[in-house]
Image (cartoon, grey):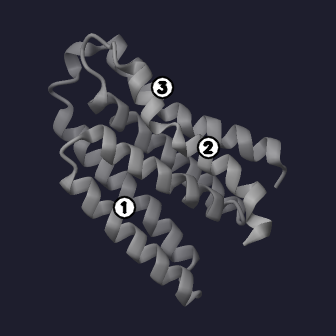
Amino acid sequence: MQYTNYFFASVISFLGLLIGLLLVKIAPEEQKPLKKYFSSLRKIFLLLIFIFLIFYYFSNLLYLTALILLFAALFTAELRAKNLFKGSMLAYSIFGILFFISSGNTSLFVIESSLIMLYGIPTSSLMCNKKGNNAYKILYYNIPFIIIANLLPFLAPYF
């Protein structure tokens, strides 16, 4: 895969956060009634991200074990996170690694990048306050996704 395609796919995956912010800007009165659905959607998308990775790497026991441990750690952190910003920052940092891992298979890459974008919509909708003055903070806390996802292709030959 060419790096330009990879880079733009990572940016588009990150745009899910902006879509969620835009959703709150357009309909702020819907944020409170939809809060429980957004929380459920985050968990469902997180589960789907790992299910597709696990099915793809099912034959490789080392990758499978690492993915299951990574999922268990992330899901536990996600459930216990008192601060949604810290939980999201951890999740998007791990998503940067998973984004790079999935780039080896085009079909898996498309699915994973789409699910990461869909995960960002309810995440940023939950983090955004009604006035919308923390939009920069949401993007700032989740920027490790872009950094990690775009540095790993350059660092991979050294591993």
Query: Disc 2 on helix, strand or loop?
Result: helix
Q: Which mark sits nearer the N-terminus, 1 or 2?
A: 1
* Whole-percent x, y for residue 101 in the image: 63, 64
Mark-to-mark CA distance, 1 and 2: 23 Å
Question: Do the residues under discs 1 and 3 have CB atoms within 8 angstroms?
Answer: no
Q: At numbered mark 3, what does the secondary structure look like: helix, strand or loop?
A: helix
Q: What's the residue at 27%, 10% (across, down)? A: 131
Residue 87 is situated, as x and y percent measured from the top left of the image, at 32, 47
Quarter of the image that includes the N terminus: bottom right
**Looking at the figure, which quarter contains the C terminus?**
bottom right
Question: Nearer the observer, disc 1 or disc 2?
Answer: 2
Nearer the viewer's eye, disc 1 or disc 3?
3
58 shown above or below 44? below
Q: Quadrant of residue 127?
A: top left
Bin the neighbour count of mark 2 within 10 Å (Cα to Cα): few under 14, some 14-19, many 20 and up.
Answer: few
Q: Earlier in the sequence, mark 2 or mark 3?
A: 3
Residue 135 image-quadrant placement: top left
Inspect the image, locate mark 3, and give the three-letter code of the amino acid beneath it: Leu
Amino acid type of disc 1? Leu
Residue type, label 2? Ile
- The residue drawn where x is 47% and y is 30% is 140
The picture places residue 83, in percent across and down from the top left corner, at 23, 41
Mark 2 to mark 3 CA distance (whole Å): 17 Å
Q: Is residue 73 left or right of residue 34?
A: right
Q: Secondary structure at mark 1?
A: helix
Picture coordinates of residue 76, whole percent (x, y): 25, 63
Residue bearing mark 3: 18
Find disc 2 in the rendering and name its residue.
Answer: 147
Residue 47, numbered label: 1
